[in-house]
Amino acid sequence: MSLWVFATLVAAFAQTVRFVLQKHLANAGLSVNGATFARFVFSLPIVTLLVLGYVALSGATVPALSGSFLVLAALGGLLQMLATVCVVATFKLRNFSIGVTFKKTEVMQSAIIGLVFLGDLVSFWGWVALAIGLVGVLILSDPPTATGPWRTRIFNKAAGLGLLSGLLFALCGVSFRAALIGIEGDDVFLRAMFTLALVTGFQTLVLGLWLHTRERGEIARVVSAWRVAAGVGLAGMIGSLGWFTAFAEQTVAYVTALGQVELIFTLIASIVIFREKAYVREFLGVAVLMASILILVLAV
C-alpha cells in the first residue's frame, strides 16, 4: 500500500472521530468558534512534542523556511479555520452525516483549483466522477422533509455553508500542498509534522486572540470541557498529519477523493452514535457520491 493511501485512510477515520467530538462540544454549549478552537489548542502541544521527539531520536535536520512557505502555510491555516467553522455551523442545521457530506464537495472543487494553481492534472474519468459527485451533492442538499419550490429547498443555508466549507477546504488543501512541495528534503513525515506544528501554532494564536476579544469567557469554557476537547485535539492532530503526509506525496484531488471513505464512517456515526434518522434520499445521495469516489480511485 502506498504511503499516501495509508495516510489518507488514517486521516479520514481520525477526522470522523474529531467531527463526532466537535458535534458533542457544539451541542454542549460551546460556540462554533469555541468548538473549532478546541481542535487547535489541544493539538499544538501534542504535535510539538512529536516533532521534537522525532528530531531528537532520528537526528534529522529541521527544514529551512522560506518566505513563500510561511505565506502558503499561513494562508492554508486561515482557510482551514474558516472551513472548520462552516462545518460545525452546518451540524447545527442538518444531521452529522449530511454536514460532513457537504464538506466533501472539496473533492470536486480541489480538482479545479489544483489544476489552475498547481497544474495538477485530472484524467477524463476523473472529470466524469466529479460530475457524478455533483449529482450526489444536489440530492443531499434537498432536505428530506422539506416542502415548497425545489429551488428554495436546494439553495438553503445548510447547503450554502456546506458547499462553502468544501471550497475553503479545497483551497487550504492546495495551499498546504504548495507549501509542502516547496520544502527541501526527502523525509516526508518530518516535512508534514514540521508544517503541521507551525500551522497549528498559528491557528491557535489567531483564533485564541479572536475569542479573547470577541467571545469573552469562551476559552475558559473550552478548557472546562477538556475531557472531550482533548480528544478533539488528538484526533485533529492525527488527521491533519495524515492529510499533510498524503498531500506531500499526491495531488490534492486524488487525496481528497480517497478521503471520501469518511462518508461511510460518518453515516455509521450518525446512525449509531447520534441516533439520527437516515432517509432513503440521503442513502441514495451517499451512494451516488461513493460511485464517484470509486471511479476516481480507479482513475489514479
Image (cartoon, rainbow, N blue to C red):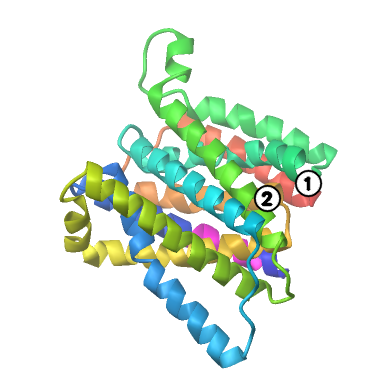
User: Does residue 99 appear to the left or right of 220 in the view shown?
Assistant: right
Mark 1, Cα crowd under 10 Å, few <14 / some 14-19 / many 20+, is some
Mark 2, Cα crowd under 10 Å, few <14 / some 14-19 / many 20+, is many
Check contact, mark 2 vs mark 1: CB within 8 A.
yes
Mark 1 lies on residue: 120
Which residue is drawn at the image coordinates 50% and 52% (left, top)? 77
Which residue is drawn at the image coordinates 74% and 75% (left, top)? 186
Q: Can residue 275 be seen in this view?
A: no
User: Does residue 148 appear to the left or right of 167 in the view shown?
Assistant: left
Task: Say which quarter of the image contains residue 122.
Answer: top right
- Tally the numbered discs: 2
User: Does residue 220 appear to the left or right of 172 in the view shown?
Assistant: left
Numbered disc 2: secondary structure: helix
In the rendering, which numbered label is found on residue 53?
A: none
Q: Looking at the image, is 157 positioned above or below residue 234?
A: above
Mark 2 lies on residue: 252
Q: Position of residue 93 (x, y in %)?
A: 32, 32
Extent of the magenta region: 6-14
**What's the residue type where badge 2 is placed?**
Val
Q: Position of residue 7 (x, y in %)?
A: 61, 66
Task: Say which quarter of the image contains residue 152.
Answer: top left
Numbered disc 1: secondary structure: loop
Q: Is residue 140 visible?
A: yes
**What's the residue type where badge 1 is placed?**
Asp
Which residue is drawn at the image coordinates 46% and 26% (left, top)? 160
Q: Position of residue 273 (x, y in %)?
A: 32, 53
From the image, which quarter does the N terminus lie in? bottom right
